[in-house]
Amino acid sequence: MAEKIHSFTPVFIKLLKGPVEYLDKNVWEKLLQYKTELIVFLQGVGLTLVLDEQDGYAYIKHAVSEEDATSVSWVQRRALAYDESVMLVLLRDMMAEFEVGEATQRELIKKRREIKEYAELFFKENASRVKMLKDIDRLIERAVENGFLERSGVHEVPDEQKFRIKKLIKARVDSEVLEDFKQQLTAHAAKRIQHG
């Protein structure tokens, strides 16, 4: 007799590949439907479900400490370079401003040009403007690859290309990290002014 396959298996497989968002309606509904069974199953294999129903994202992480060298790694965790982390914090800052404002839509959509203008304030140092803007473009592409930005439609003018800033970014950069980083940036900017 064949073993019964868990009804949440397709959701589990999707979560192994990466975060799931409410926009993927089919998977999201199944995730909410089988949430309890999925949580119990994940605990049995050393994983935890992180589910934010309000912001509409879910992902899995290791329940055991990642320092435990004997544990098997289920989930890929990609380390970010410093400038990629800065870009992530800037995108998270845009998200924070969006959520504080009178948002009429649920998703934050920004043009490449707007992201570049925002980031330019923090990447001004030691570079020609042309090189700096190329670097920011590269960081935007890395944020897409890492799953924090998603292209929204296609635009023939690169700077008019729209991106959705995914709420998942809040899981990677919480408000405490954001605040610490902003304080460091402010201190750094003040030093630059003194030495400039």
Image (cartoon, helix red, strand yellow):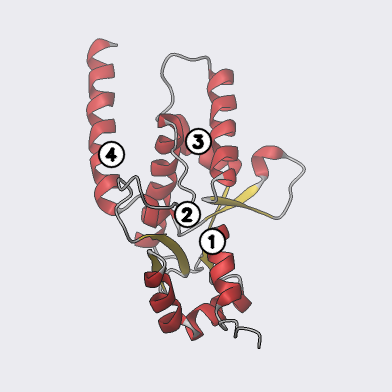
| Mark in the foreground, 1 or 3 | 1
Sequence-wise, the earlier of marks 3 and 2 is 2
User: If the image is split into quadrants, where does the N terminus sit?
Assistant: bottom right
For disc 4, the neighbor class at 10 Å (few under 14, some 14 to 19, many from 20) is some
Query: What is the residue that sits farthest to the top in this orientation?
Result: 195
Identify the element where label 4 is drawn: helix
* Left or right: 115, with 156 as reference point: left
Residue under pointer 2: 75
User: If the image is split into quadrants, where does the C terminus sit?
Assistant: top left
* Closer to us: 15 or 133: 15
Looking at the picture, which amino acid does disc 4 mark? Answer: Lys
Q: Where is residue 114 shown, x and y percent of the image? A: 54, 42
Query: What is the residue that sits farthest to the right in this orientation?
Result: 156
Sequence-wise, the earlier of marks 4 and 3 is 3
Cα distance between the residues tagged 1 and 3: 35 Å
Do the CB atoms of the residues marked 2 and 1 lie less than 8 Å apart? yes
Looking at the picture, which amino acid does disc 2 mark? Answer: Val
Sequence-wise, the earlier of marks 2 and 4 is 2
Residue under pointer 1: 16
Above-or-below relation of 110 to 133 = below
Cα distance between the residues tagged 4 and 1: 33 Å
Residue under pointer 4: 182
Sequence-wise, the earlier of marks 2 and 1 is 1
* Closer to us: 23 or 18: 18
| Mark in the foreground, 3 or 2 | 2
| Mark in the foreground, 4 or 3 | 4
Cα distance between the residues tagged 2 and 1: 7 Å
Cα distance between the residues tagged 3 and 2: 34 Å
